[in-house]
Amino acid sequence: MKNLKETLYEMRTFLMLWSTQSLSALGSGMTSYALVIWSYSQKGSALMTALLMVWSYAPYVILSIFAGAVSDRWDKKKTMLVCDTVAAITTVITLVLLQHDMLQIWHLYVINAVNGFMNTVQQPASEVATTRVLPRKYYQKVGGLRYFSNSLNSILKPIIATAVLGIAGIDGVITIDLLTFAAAFLTLAFLIKIPEGEQPAEIKESMLTSAKQGIDYLKKERGILDLILFLAAINLVASIYDAAFPAMLLSRNGGSEAALGMVNAVIGATTLAGSILSFFVKEPKSRVRVICNCLLFSMSFENFILAFGRTTLVWSIGGFLGWIFIPLMSTNLEAILRLHIPESMQGRIYSVRNSLQFFTIPVGYFLGGILVDQVFEPIMAVQKSSSLLVRMFGSGKGSGAAFLFFVIAFAGIAVCLYFRHDKHLWELEE
């Protein structure tokens, strides 16, 4: 108990920041979940829905490489407050358009692009702020706590959003989002102090020069660079999965909004359990081995089970196997980055990391939407009832998405096996 009290005291600032920001993330997640259902109900197109995430990530990956230079120059707290405020304004605009029955999908694309730009600046500032308020000895635990909140949000998001949609409609969901934003904003503004570290001498140099320093660092640190590229390849496969996932569960036999919500809730509960495990597990002898093995396990099971599954129970089992070890992977990934990258360079390095690691996400969402709507669904639509593909993946709308899951399972396994033999990754253990 004495050690627990000491831990809570030393982490108190981080815990306050983490808990309120997580609450706000729950509200934002509920709005995103409701808008995905709304957009799919308008067009019934996986591509149109996937483009919501494309517009969110496009400015993020294009501009992130320069955002670190901005982050290293600006006050972290003010940066986070301004970005949160702009995001809240876009949410209010969405609410007003809905209330006047004027909301269209292209409005959401523009709004998501603005939020993506704000996240571009806020994310590196938030990472550095975490480093500043958190004692070094707790770096291993912070990844577990973040996945704890993310997984708890994944459980609550579909449940609360579905309930509120039934009672108060999408207007009620957005209102809750704004209330959680207010709680996080006021806590950060008045109760949390984020110390500013010493500014490096080169801080007066141009943004291009500062961004170049981040790139040059990664060129010299090939282990960190290859680790980022590994995650970029995984993100490509995962974003194709994310584009196909709601299309399959909302449209195929056995699927529905309830099925989508149930499987998402199971995934959230699984990552919650995994985050608790990662919080208490001891530091491994090989963080790289943990990262590789966790991702290989995930890619080896979930996509196959989703491809062949026909019921919510089977899809939920796939979600469990796919996500149980992801928090442990993320915890060790964050620990490697924080321990290897100098604090004075973290804003720039994290921003370059964001551009390299996440540029595959909008590409994957776009590809996923195209592949479902234009390739795999048409292929399954012309199959005879006695064909091998129909016996494997079923028939009707959604069977093409299941076929796609089967294909990307092999792609994910291939990526894991390739990077598992990358000698530069193992240099991080030295």
Image (spheres, helix red, strand yellow):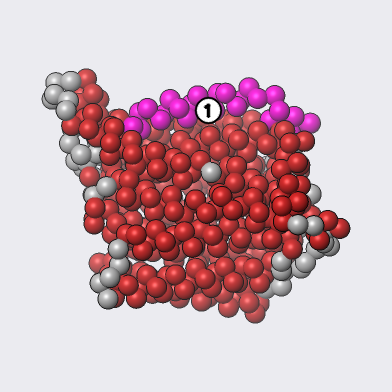
Say if 312 sits above or below 230 in the image.
Answer: below
Coordinates of residue 121 in the picture (x, y in percent): 61, 60
Q: Nearer the viewer, residue 98 or 292?
A: 98
Q: Which residue is drawn at 72% across and 39% down?
A: 218
Q: Does dot 1 land on a helix, a strand or a loop?
A: helix
Coordinates of residue 75 in the picture (x, y in percent): 71, 68
Q: Which of 169 and 90 is in front in this view?
A: 90
Q: Residue at x 46, y 55 (%)?
A: 56
Local packing at callout 1 (Cα closer than 10 Å; few below 14, some 14-19, many 20+) is: some
Say if 36 sits above or below 194 in the image.
Answer: above
Q: Mark 1 points at which residue?
A: 415
Give the tally of numbered discs. 1
Q: Give the range drawn in magenta.
A: 404-430
Coordinates of residue 217 in the picture (x, y in percent): 76, 42
Three-letter code, disc 1: Val
Q: Quadrant of the N terminus?
A: bottom right
Q: Does the magenta stretch include residue 56?
A: no
Q: Residue at x 71, y 66 (%)?
A: 74
The reply to whether residue 30 is in sight is no
Q: Which residue is drawn at 76% across and 68% down?
A: 195
The reply to whether residue 14 is in sight is yes
Q: In which quarter of the image is the C terminus?
A: top right
Q: Which residue lies furthest to the left in this view?
A: 385
Q: Which of 197 and 98 is in front in this view?
A: 98
Q: Is residue 424 magenta?
A: yes
Predominant SS along the magenta part: helix
Q: In which quarter of the image is residue 407?
A: top left
Coordinates of residue 405 in the picture (x, y in percent): 35, 33
User: In the shown orientation, is residue 185 left or right of residue 44?
Assistant: right
User: In the shown orientation, is residue 204 left or right of residue 157?
Assistant: right
Say if 229 sits above or below 100 in the image.
Answer: above
